[in-house]
């Protein structure tokens, strides 16, 4: 039951994007299509899960003073794995996401979970926490990407439902802010935060 | 608020005279859509008393129509009206709480979203004239100048291709509905001055800074920079200065603040017109300065009532 809570809190109760407003850089920058959002979300999920596991395993070995650099090194190792795997097996997506894959290293969601959860809890809890948080992040990015793609290009996951040029601003960065603002308002309304 | 609507009537008549049925269609759809969104959001989302009668949605609708070309497709006008009312105004809580001018947000949104449709300006042709040129579009005078300077022509060369100053003042230059005639806008502005709807600070500071800035550039090199008079009579400067920068909700409260607001907007306008990617910068300048209004209000508070 406790593991289920660790897992499920990442989706709405403590969602990284909608509730805690963490990791805004990839959220706003790469979500110009649903595929990009999903790809970025899943890459972050993998990094988050693996870094949570490793950090919770070695938490007693890390001196308190150098814990942040140690976290960064662990995270950077897994980001490199994701970067190379993606470059090898999904070069088109890798091209699209570009610099934002290496930038997962400094994503505050990943570092935040390492600092706030993995360094204080056991391996199993940390694994479920990382998985839930990551999937919640991926869900938020996919939702935002889908909305922006639907309005900005009249297509969803690359399938065009109106053969016409969309509302271009939603593909550009101002559209990301507008769409995210309304999405957060909507999620707050649904989860009765206001 | 209906004073502003009355002040817009001369420009309205001139735009219908030059653009015919297209102008009537754009204005009607824009106003009806704005009123509808205002009513629907107030009724179903905010659940408050109807604000449709305060006239602000109607002003937004007319101003939005003034800011777009007369051959804009109906769907795009409705999107613009929705953005103006729903995103720029009602999502902040309605009239009086919006930080940005609703009509300008709608215009900039459309300009970025639909660059092709928003920059194909129909050439104005007076009503009842025999010329049948329905589908012909051309660039605005500022667009001609921008393109010309980019391709390395000199100003005196370009000036032969653009309308004369007189045409700019009386009407007949290519552009959006509201910017064809400076004189019609001026008549409306004088009416608003007499009725004390607007004060002198913002228009004077805005126009003054545009004239001084472009005047300095013109004196430095008249072959590279066009003259201040050209900047005044073309484009949406008069429309923006009198009808949108002076919007009481989105401009500073104190007289000093208003001067700073106008000065900043004028300088940004010239920077965008001379060095920017877009030929016209009035709408961007006013929106940027709108964002500074809370800061200006903090720095220059109006005197407390009763304080000497």
Image (cartoon, helix red, strand yellow):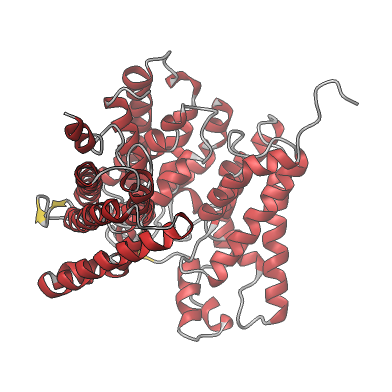
The quarter of the picture where the N terminus of chain B appears is top right
| Residue B137 in the image, given as x and y percentages of width and height | 33, 63
Q: How many marks?
A: 0
At horizontal 38% and vertical 20% (from top left) the residue drawn is B46
**Extreme front residue here?**
A61
Q: Is residue B192 above or below residue B1?
A: below
> Would you say A119 lies left or right of A126 here?
right
Q: Nearer the viewer, residue B274 or B20?
A: B274
At horizontal 14% and vertical 52% (from top left) the residue drawn is A155
The quarter of the picture where the C terminus of chain B appears is top right
Q: Is residue B274 above or below residue B296?
A: below
> Would you say B190 lies left or right of A40 here?
right
| Residue B44 in the image, given as x and y percentages of width and height | 31, 19
**Extreme top residue here?**
B49
Q: Is residue B142 above or below residue B63?
A: below
| Residue A173 in the image, given as x and y percentages of width and height | 36, 56
At horizontal 20% and vertical 31% (from top left) the residue drawn is A2
Q: Nearer the viewer, residue A29 or B45?
A: A29
| Residue A4 in the image, given as x and y percentages of width and height | 17, 33
Q: Is residue A62 above or below residue B195?
A: below
At horizontal 58% and vertical 60% (from top left) the residue drawn is B269
């Amino acid at each position: 039951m406790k593991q289920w809570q660790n897992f499920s809190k990442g989706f709405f109760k403590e969602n990284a994007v909608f509730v805690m407003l963490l990791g805004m850089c990839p959220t706003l920058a790469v979500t110009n299509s649903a595929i990009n959002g999903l790809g970025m979300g899943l890459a972050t999920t993998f990094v988050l899960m693996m870094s949570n596991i490793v950090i919770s395993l070695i938490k007693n070995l890390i001196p308190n003073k150098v814990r942040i650099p140690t976290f960064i090194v662990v995270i950077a190792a897994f980001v490199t794995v994701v970067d190379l795997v993606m470059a090898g097996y999904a070069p088109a997506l890798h091209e699209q996401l570009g610099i934002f894959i290496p930038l997962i290293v400094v994503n505050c969601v990943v570092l935040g979970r390492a600092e706030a959860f993995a360094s204080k809890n056991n391996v199993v809890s940390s694994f479920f926490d990382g998985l839930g948080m990551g999937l919640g992040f991926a869900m938020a990015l996919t939702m935002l990407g889908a909305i922006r793609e639907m309005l900005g290009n009249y297509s969803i996951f690359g399938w065009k439902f109106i053969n016409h040029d969309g509302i271009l601003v939603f593909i550009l960065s101002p559209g990301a802010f507008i769409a995210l603002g309304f999405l957060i308002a909507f999620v707050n309304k649904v989860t009765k935060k206001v | 608020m209906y004073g502003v609507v009355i002040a817009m009537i001369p420009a309205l008549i001139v735009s219908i005279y030059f653009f015919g049925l297209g102008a009537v269609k754009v204005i009607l759809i824009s106003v009806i859509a704005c009123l509808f969104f205002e009513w629907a959001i107030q009724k179903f989302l905010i659940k408050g008393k109807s604000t449709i009668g305060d006239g602000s949605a109607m002003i937004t609708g007319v101003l939005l129509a003034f800011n777009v070309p007369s051959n804009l497709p109906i769907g795009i006008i409705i999107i613009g009206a929705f953005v103006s009312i729903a995103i720029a105004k009602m999502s902040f809580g309605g009239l009086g709480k919006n930080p940005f001018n609703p009509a300008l947000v709608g215009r900039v949104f459309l300009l970025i979203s639909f660059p092709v449709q928003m920059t194909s300006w129909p050439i104005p042709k007076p009503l009842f004239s025999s010329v049948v040129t329905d589908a012909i579009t051309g660039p605005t005078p500022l667009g001609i100048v921008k393109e010309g300077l980019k391709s390395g022509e000199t100003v005196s060369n370009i000036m032969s291709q653009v309308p004369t100053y007189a045409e700019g003042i009386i009407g007949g230059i290519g552009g959006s509905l509201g910017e064809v005639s400076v004189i019609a806008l001026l008549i409306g502005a004088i009416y608003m001055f007499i009725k004390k709807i607007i004060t002198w600070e913002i228009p004077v500071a805005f126009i003054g800074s545009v004239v001084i800035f472009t005047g300095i550039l013109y004196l430095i090199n008249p072959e590279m920079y066009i003259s201040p008079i050209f900047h005044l009579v073309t484009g949406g400067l008069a429309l923006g200065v009198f009808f949108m920068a002076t919007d009481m909700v989105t401009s500073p409260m104190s007289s000093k603040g208003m001067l700073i607001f106008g000065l900043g907007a004028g300088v940004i306008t010239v920077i965008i017109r001379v060095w920017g990617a877009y030929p016209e910068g009035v709408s961007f300048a006013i929106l940027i300065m709108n964002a500074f209004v809370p800061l200006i209000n903090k720095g220059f508070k109006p005197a407390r009532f009763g304080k000497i």
